[in-house]
Amino acid sequence: MKSTILIVDDNEDIRFTLNEVCSFGGYAVLEASTGKMGVDVCKKMEPDLILLDYHMPNWDGLKTTKEIRKFNDKTPIIILTVDERQEVANMFLHAGATDFALKPFRAPDLLSRIRINLKIGRLTANQESVFVEKGINQGTLMSIKNFLLQQGTARTINEIQEELPIAYQTVHRYLNYLEGKGEVEIICHYGKKGRPKNLYKLV
């Protein structure tokens, strides 16, 4: 059965392009031209993933993300934006977004992000809320799992926190949480010098 992607963007040309890309990737597509319409479609149709534009009139991407997360805390939301600032990324992650695609996007890159986020969405489909445990936010959790999923080899905490970036202590706490749930494997690497390093990868 095809996964369904909801495209929310006020620009008709961009919606057309995104529709073509998603259809080429083998996905069913729903469209909405406003944030409010996107929320209504999401409630009725329950898409598997949402592509959401940041800059829209009335309800922008942030407002729309917050409204969706009031009733749906599982469906992956990829934000489409030209804004590369880290504070914008942090703002969206805190609101519940799971990933970002910078405009202008390349079709192969976007399809790769869609595939990864759909897989992450399936991995976390049984989580009961955005806060899966006290102090554990699903947005942050999915960001870390997303990064690990894209890696060909196990990674250190330093490598993870430098790439995302999330504070070292936060990454360590979330990895311990995932390791306790059996979703992450810890590999002890012994180098030629110094103390052994812990490497982490998704099971």
Image (cartoon, rainbow, N blue to C red):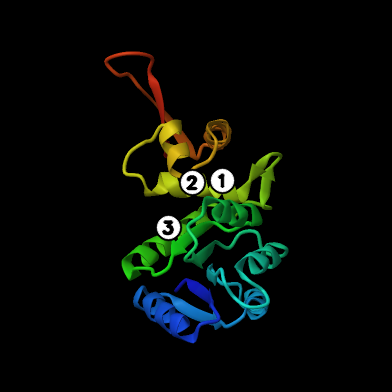
For the residue marked with disc 2, what is the amino acid?
Lys
Above or below for 37 versus 104: below
- Could you tell whether 56 is left or right of 11 in the image? right
What SS does tag 1 mark?
helix
Q: Residue placed at 43% from the left, 77% from the top? A: 18
Label disc, if present, on residue 145 of the rendered structure: 2
> Can residue 203 be seen at all in this image of the molecule?
no
Q: Could you say where residue 108 lies in the image, as x and y percent from the top left?
A: 32, 66
Residue under label 3, please give it. Answer: 116
Provide residue 38's location: percent of width, then percent of height: 62, 77
Residue 63 in the image, given as x and y percentages of width and height: 67, 67
Q: Residue at x 59, y 53 (%)?
A: 93
Mark 3: give few (<14), some (14-19) or many (20+) Cα within 10 Å: some
**Inter-mark Cα distance, 1 to 2:** 6 Å
Q: Residues under labels 3 and 2: Cα distance?
A: 10 Å
Q: Mark 1 near mark 2, Cβ–Cβ under 8 Å?
A: yes
Residue under the point 58% across and 83% down = 33
